[in-house]
Image (tube, rainbow, N blue to C red):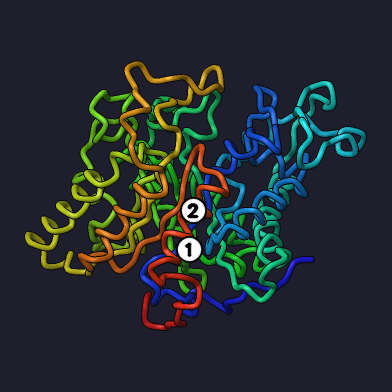
Amino acid sequence: MVIKSGFENTQEIPLKCPILLLDGGLGTTLEAPPYNTKFSQSTPLWSSHLLVSSPEILEDLQRDFVRNGADILLTATYQASFEGFAATPRVSPLASSLTGGKGTNHELSTERMTLIGYGKDEAKGFMRNAVLIAQSAFSLHSYERDKKGLIALSLGAYGATMRPSQEYTGDYPPTLMADASGLSNWHAERLAVFTESQQTWDAVDFVAFETIPLLEEVYAIRRSMAKVVSGEKRRKWWISCVFPDEVTNQGYRLPDGNSPVEVIKAMLSPSRDQEYQTPWGVGINCTKVEKIRHLVRSYEEGIRDMTAHDDSAAFGWPWLVLCPDGAEGLVYNTSTQTWDETAGYDKAVQKESWDKQVFEVVMEIHEEKKWKGVIVGGCCKTSPAHIGRLREQFNNIGWNRESWQSTKDDK
């Protein structure tokens, strides 16, 4: 059963609490026990493939994140795209009936599929259903039936929909990048899938653009939001960028070489002609946890520089979104779709657990009281158990659901 969102609109989202907990890595958790999902070249949608093949398994996993304390669920749409659905072999009725459940190795193989892709109308239905599945995960968990959960629409970088994926490199097709409006139009078309359905859009509390590798794509997303989402359709939204070591060998720059200071300015620079919509939050995701502190400081440096040199940028501080990965030295190989060990990485050097490292960074940020608040969760290799341990850290200091208060002035 799907129930109505607990909040009539985003002005009623309980954001007086300075810390909200997001979920973790959906695709990598599906690959691990007890789900044991096997993704391959025949499943270009990655975790979004379960919208087609096994929505009940997807809902079960998202409910597990809720049980472990997630306040916000990201929808299973990170890699969803019209191109991805068109390249996805159809799941036959027999294949659907054979799909295993929790604790079953249910490999998504071509033996159970035909070779015809899904059209745009079908793709829209699957993508919109991801929002309803996340709603259901909040409404059907067993321990707290009246919990009011929040839904964040997850939209990955264009590179996340490529094969092999390129969100860690930003190596996009020249034909797409030749026209300044190419990326913006692509994001706007996918975003419109959700805004054009009133039922779907009413259930969305946040829009999350994740793992963005290019400064140019940051601007494209801001243009797409200005084009598609306005007036009563406006939602709180954020952009999260990725800072992978394996691309630049520097670790503190985008794959395109831009610094965090340049990134934050691209995210928040004012738009005098309304061409760009300014995000409510800015973030870092799919990045090693040990790098987060330095990157946040660089973001802060960029904001201070903006406010010092441009009066029109005196907009106050946004919310900060942090979703570091839990890969512990592993790096995802987009060609082989496997996790490879990083040369020279010594696990013994990591003296603290993922949840403790994240907790310490968030508490430093909270105590300094610069940012309006923090949304924190995990990315690749972070499971419901990781989120549960992080929730326990916050509960121990009194930051929990009961400390939320409704607000109508945090726009």
**What residue is shown at x 55% (from left), y 66% (from top)?**
150
Residue 149 coordinates in the image, percent (x, y): 58, 68
**Residue type pointed to by label 2:** Arg
| Amino acid at dot 1 | Val
Counting residues from the start of the chain, the first of labels 1 and 2 encountered is 1
Q: For the C terminus, which image quadrant?
A: bottom left
Q: Which residue shows up at 47% across the image and 67% down it?
A: 235
Left or right of residue 109: residue 320: left
Q: Is residue 310 left or right of residue 348?
A: left
Per the model, the C-alpha gap separating discs 1 and 2 is 36 Å
Q: Residue at x 40, y 27 (%)?
A: 329
For disc 2, the neighbor class at 10 Å (few under 14, some 14 to 19, many from 20) is some
The circle on residue 389 is 2
Asked if one can make out residue 85 in the rendered structure from this viewpoint, the answer is yes
Quarter of the picture holding the N terminus: bottom right
Residue 326, quarter of picture = top left
Q: Quadrant of residue 260?
A: top left
- Of 295 and 11, nearer the camera is 295
Which circle marks residue 229 in the picture? 1
- The image shows residue 218 at horizontal and vertical percentages of 35, 46
Residue 241 x, y percent position in the rendering: 36, 43
Q: Nearer the viewer, residue 238 or 380?
A: 380
Note whether 257 is above or below 201 in the view shown. Answer: above
- In the image, 117: left or right of 148? right
- Dot 1 crowding, Cα within 10 Å, few <14, some 14–19, many 20+: some
